Image (cartoon, helix red, strand yellow):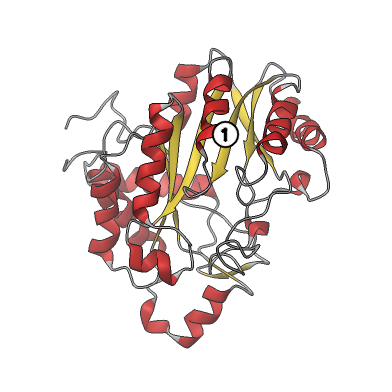
Amino acid sequence: MEKRNNKPFRDFGDFLQMVFPFKVQKISINAGFTCPNRDGTKGRGGCTYCNNQTFSPQYAANGKTVSRQLEEGIRFFSHKYPQMKYLAYFQAYTNTYDRLENLLAKYYEALNYPNVVGLIIGTRPDCMPGELLDELHKISKKYFVLVEYGIESTNNETLKFINRGHTYEEAVETIQRTHKRGILCGAHLILGLPGENREMILSHADKISSLPLTSLKLHQLQLIKHTRMAAQLKETPELFHLYEIDEYIDLCIDFLERLNPDFYIERFVSQSPKHLLAVPGWGLKNYEFTARFNKRIRERESFQGNKV
């Protein structure tokens, strides 16, 4: 494969610039949904790594309406870019897990808010009924819609160990159904889950490359305090390999080399609040990681799809 536009990988920001003639910013929404892996439908306690406090900003606190969260989030960003438009990012827990009328009411509450031009909906692949896809298809005719599915791993043994509650095959089937409705799909993977060696991690790139995805989020395994996985680290440390920063950067580059060159990459890392994070504590801001990543991929003269 050849590198495009002299960039080593396709950046999700470039995709948004291609879609929209103006700047857009995601505003995270906690709409008060739960998860079938928490309420007893599929399990209790959720995934072993899960603590939603790690990715819900202050303005997306429980109890606030969708409109209130948008108001506060937009106020945070609008002073810098007054002409900016916004994407309502339904992020916390499973944002397709409720009665259809409740889901649509919250989606349309967001879409009816001034300067909101679309939705990004984070969910599980086992929580996307056909009737909801029908409604999202209708919405996508007027607004930007991207559904982001948490795959996490393509290895079913890993998914079982982390108490994920679905299989990789379910993720494949749901992504294909979503794509057939003309709805954009994103995916999320965690690199370094317990029991997965380097080759197993890289094989995820091979497997997902055949899926009809627009975007991909990667992030390193982070162990959050008071989660089941944090306890497992103490009980069975031999199952874990916690990557140092430079080792993880090389892992991501190896992953990119085997990845479909048409996917847009949204991120390589996630940054959990220090007071919640157990390990690893790299002590880097996201922009500092990006600078080191870009330097290393140039040194290696590598790029996305290099080995496809």
x and y percentages locating residue 137 in the rendered image:
52, 23
Give the image quarter of residue 242: bottom left
Visible residue check, residue 70: yes
x and y percentages locating residue 113 in the rendered image:
76, 23
x and y percentages locating residue 10 in the rendered image:
35, 32
- In-front residue for pair 190/136: 136
In the image, what residue occupies the spot 41% across and 64% down? Answer: 159
Horizontal relation, residue 52 to residue 73: left or right:
left
Give the image quarter of residue 86: top right
Q: Quadrant of the N terminus?
A: top left
Say which amino acid is labelled 1.
Answer: Ile
Q: How many marks do you count on the picture?
A: 1
- In-front residue for pair 286/69: 69
x and y percentages locating residue 112 in the rendered image:
74, 21
In the image, what residue occupies the spot 66% across and 20% down? Answer: 84
Give the image quarter of residue 215: top left
Q: Residue furthest front?
A: 131
Horizontal relation, residue 204 to residue 68: left or right:
left
In the image, what residue occupies the spot 27% across and 64% down? Answer: 198
Visible residue check, residue 264: no
- In-front residue for pair 8/119: 119
Which residue is disc 1 drawn over?
Answer: 120
Q: Residues within 10 Å of mark 1 (few under 14, many from 20)?
A: many
Which secondary structure lies at badge 1?
strand
